[in-house]
Image (spheres, grey):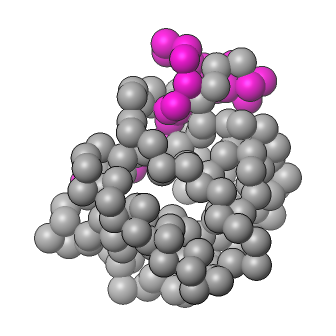
Amino acid sequence: MGVVSGYSGGASVAPTYEAVCRGETGHAEVIQIEFDPEIIGYETLVNIFFATHDPTTPDRQGNDVGTQYRSVIFFHSDAQNRIATEVRAQLASNDVFSAPIVTEIRPVDAFWPAEAYHQNYFERNPQQPYCRAVVAPKVAKFRQRFAEFLVPKP
C-alpha cells in the first residue's frame, strides 16, 4: 500500500513538473493510491477525495489555476468507474456542494511518477508557505473527519 505523486491524463510521454505546470502536457497533477480493499474500500477513498478538495471549480484548486489542477478521478476498472460515478451523482443529487460538481471520471491511460522531490512533499516541507496555507488545512480536515483511517507512525 502507498501513495505516489505524479501526472496523468495528458499526451506527453514522461512529463516533467515544469512542463506540467506550464500547461504544456495536458496532464493533471494526481496521486496514485495502492490500497488493500480489506482495509479501506474504493468508495471510501472516493468519498475522501470529494471531501478534501473543491470539486466545483474547473481547472482550479485554491490559488492554483490551469488544466493541470482540474478535478479528476482516473479509474482502473469498470467497478471503479461505476463507484466513482455513483458517488459523484449522489453528492450532486444531495446538493452537498453549493455549485455543480465538475469532476471528470476517466480511464487511466498512463501514470507518470513525479520527480523525487515531490514525493511526500508536505511531510518533508511542512513550513513551506504553500504547505502551511493550502495543504495543512486540508490535512487537518482529513484528520478530523477521517481519523479512523489514520495509521500511527512507527
Where is residue 89 drawn, in percent x and y?
Answer: 50, 71
Per the rendered image, the range of residues in magenta is 1-23
Quadrant occupied by the C terminus: bottom left
> Residue at the spot x=55%, y=14% of the render?
12
- Is residue 6 highlighted in magenta? yes
The answer to whether 134 appears left or right of 1 in the picture is right
Where is residue 36 drawn, in percent x and y?
Answer: 19, 61
> Residue at the spot x=65%, y=64% of the render?
101
Where is residue 134 drawn, in percent x and y?
Answer: 75, 62
Query: Quick one: which residue is furthest to the right in this view?
Result: 63
The answer to whether 88 appears left or right of 25 in the picture is left
On the question of residue 119 being in view, the answer is: no
Where is residue 61 drawn, in percent x and y?
Answer: 74, 54
On the question of residue 85 being in view, the answer is: yes
> Residue at the spot x=52%, y=86% of the render?
145
Residue 122: quarter of image:
bottom right
Query: Quick one: which residue is furthest to the left in this view?
Result: 38
> Residue at the spot x=78%, y=38% of the render?
66
Q: Is residue 82 above or below residue 146?
A: above
Give the camera-side residue of 5 and 116: 5
Quadrant occupied by the N terminus: bottom left
Query: Quick one: which residue is furthest to the front in this view?
Result: 93
The answer to whether 120 appears left or right of 36 in the picture is right
